[in-house]
Amino acid sequence: MNISGPTPLVPIQRADETGLALRLNQRIAAEVLQVSGDRVTLAMEGVHVVAQLTSSDQPAALLERRTAQFVVRDTSGPLMVLQLVNSGQPSPVSKATPDLIPNLLRFAGLEVSDAATYIARALLSHGLPVTADLVTELQEALAQVEGWSQADAETAAALKSEGLLLSAGTLTLARSPSPPLAEMLASLYTRLQTLSKRRLPPELAALVQNALTALEGMAVDWSDPAALSDALKRAASGVGRSLESELVHLARSKDTPQAAGGSQAALTLATLRRSLSGGEFQPLADDIEHFLDAMRVMQFANSGPDSPPVKERWLSLDLPLGALAAQEGDPSGGKAHIQPAHIRIAYPPDGESNAIDPAHTRLVIRVDLDARTTLQVDLSVADHRIGAHILASDDDLRLAAEGEMPGLQAGLEKLGFILQTARCEAGLPAVNDAQSPSAWTVFSEVRAEV
């Protein structure tokens, strides 16, 4: 798609013309910018090149990687040949080597048992080594889960691979299934609205009204572009702040939960849940608890790493889009129309910093407009220059997205960014947003032997 305004990247025809001083058998590290088909886009020393992969399973192995290692195998021809050294993909346990896990356990000084085998298999599948310390740590956490299975071991290993704290409590939290946050919020808001119309004691009525205000603040009303920025900040704060942090803030400010209102959403809901516990309102109290649990899962996933993560770190937020409160003249009769928005923002690679650098990051936003319609905007940011990849679930939505491109470009320029490249395609996003390819488009090519 052609877009007027952005300056295209300068084509790079040959690797030896880019200033890259590479020698035979040299090991190099490159940033993986994009995986498309059998080709992968790399950034090496500020130079963008495209490697063609010779094995059909290699693109999938690179999807989770922001960096990868290669060995230079040939520089004599017109195309540089690279060999992939480490794909970063979790190593599957081969059925052709049935003695692999028992041997690893014995090498680690551990007894071979069913429990240890489950844990070792989970560690390998998530790219972790089979060591005595790791196996023991997972065993101690899983021992507090009655009748734990291979799936529980996989969950525990996944937490360790992401650098998150592993305990009986965090394992239970990660194992708790829940509907999408936006769906739970809309349902809870409707039930609280119904409750607010009943004759309630004054104190309980005030708590219900505060809870409705808190839920309204968690939803992003995107009907007013001028107020969208403030709505996003308010929603991210409401959904992203944990109950514990709100309690600390409350203790310092000496406010009451009623006075905190929508500014302390989790605390407001927790206070109402306690007041509703017991009697006829217990099912509603349970719904509030389930909603708070869903918030805890997201907040836990975004907590600081307890140990160095194996995978790249992303800040992940699920924000409800739409207006919960009924608008005057609304033909829907006040029924909430909420669409979930899934936002992923990349931290610097290799654990360089716990702060996101807006000038060098990647932002992926996916909005599920309905059960069959999805729009994903993928922005790769490098030195305030952005490569945009918009993926629409059908051609009609793609055409609508193309029509909004000039507005996107103008909005980014107001924020100090340059829309360097942009393309809009029809298709469905990957299951995991963070694994989808980056949006930079480049012109040079190298051939990679994998």
Image (cartoon, helix red, strand yellow):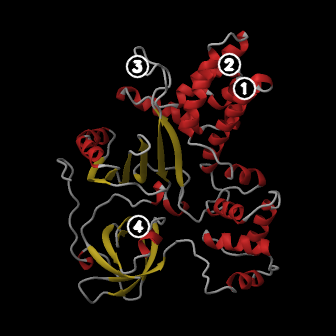
Mark 4 and mark 2: Cα distance apart in space: 50 Å
Label 3: element kind? loop
**For residue 240, above or below residue 66:** above
Q: Earlier in the sequence, mark 3 or mark 2?
A: 2
**Disc 1 or 2, which lies upstream in sequence?**
2
Please name the residue that numbered disc 2 is placed on: 207
Given residues 95 and 91, the one toward you in this image is: 95
Front position among marks 3 and 1: 3
| Position of residue 326 in the picture relative to residue 18 (left or right) | right
Q: CA distance from mark 4 to mark 1?
A: 47 Å
Could you tell me which residue is drawn at 64 percent across and 36 percent down? Answer: 291
Q: Amino acid at mark 3?
A: Pro
**Viewer-nearest of discs 4 and 1:** 1
Circle 4 residue: 32
Q: Are marks 1 and 2 in contact (CB under 8 Å)?
A: yes
Q: Secondary structure at mark 1?
A: helix
Q: Tag 4's secondary structure?
A: strand
Q: Amino acid at mark 1?
A: Thr
Which percent across, then down, holds residue 415?
A: 34, 40
The residue at 70%/49% (across/down) is: 173
Task: Say the numbered circle drawn on residue 331.
Answer: 3
Q: Which residue is mark 1?
A: 271
Query: Real-space Cα distance between discs 3 and 1?
Result: 33 Å
Label 1 CA crowd tier, 10 Å (few <14, some 14–19, many 20+): some
